[in-house]
Image (tube, rainbow, N blue to C red):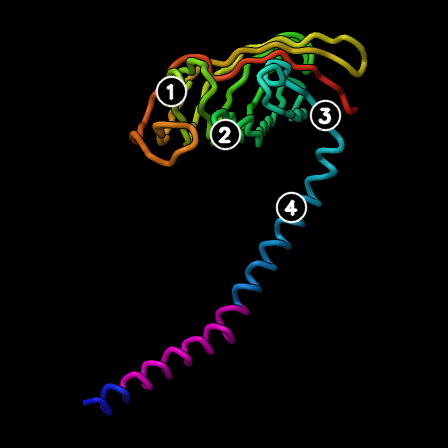
Amino acid sequence: MYGEANYFNILNTAKQNKKKVIYEKRVMPMRKKTRVKRGIIIFLFVVNYIPYISAQKICLKNNLIHDAVLIPNLSAEWTLSDKLSIDLNAAYNPFQFSDTKKWKLIAFRPEIRFWTFKKYAGAFWGVHVGYKFFNMGGIGIDIPSFGDLSSSRVQGSMYDAGITFGHQWILSPRWGIEAFLGVGYAKSVYDEYVCVKCGEKSGRYNDDYFGPTKTGISLVYMLK
């Protein structure tokens, strides 16, 4: 019995070693080639797209309202046509203020804008979508969908989509300011913890929200 069991163990080990050799000699090189091909395709796409971007009017923006609540952010916007532009916004807050207070998040929100007069001047309408990952608690603010987080913590993701109306004013050839408000739908999927520092969950929630999804007063700088 022992000899038979030992024989099967040796046989299984040999099979595993053979599979490992096949993986290292055949599968890994194929995966490396696939990654190289993907990298080349992405590189060629970027190189092909750079002349298009460089030929457009581009501006950088900073949302002052987000700055006021300690959320560093930056937006880039460039033209697609005489009346259309695309705005890409990113916000990132990695800071933890103390063991019992945190306001961490990372967010991305692209938006297509239609300018009623001319691009980067006057009123505009937009359609936006967004994603946000958050981890916050102990902040003592009543936040829609989450309630009062004075002693608890929430961690999860939020997806949103909506329409935006805004206006941009030209201050100089390089500088401007814009104000906007977006409304729509947001879906939050998150875990709630009984305290900020502990890992004890009080529940997992799915929340649907209709209302304002974005707002801001942004300082605008024209690159070209």
Image quarter hosting the N terminus:
bottom left
Disc on res. 58: 3
In the image, farthest residue toward the front? 99
Residue 83, placed above or below residue 99: above
**Circles 4 and 3: CB distance less than 8 Å?**
no
Numbered disc in front, either 1 or 2: 2
Amino acid type, callout 4:
Phe
Circle on res. 5: none
Q: Of discs 1 and 3, which sits in the foreground? A: 1
* 27 left or right, relative to 193: right
- Residue placed under numbered mark 4 in the picture: 45
Q: Estimate the spatial distance between the alpha carbons at disc 2 and disc 3, rounded to whole Å.
A: 41 Å
In the image, 212 versus 125, the foreground residue is 212
In the rendered image, residue 41, in percent from the top left (x then y), is placed at 62, 52
Q: Which residue is mark 1?
A: 146
Label 2 belongs to which residue? 99
Q: Earlier in the sequence, mark 1 or mark 2?
A: 2
Crowding near the residue tagged with mark 4, few <14, some 14–19, many ≥20 C-alpha atoms within 10 Å = few
**Residue 21 lies in the magenta stretch:** yes
Between tags 4 and 1, which lies in front?
1
Q: Residue furthest bottom?
A: 3
Task: Choose the circle earlier in sequence order: 2 or 3.
Answer: 3
Residue kind at label 1, given as amino acid type = Phe
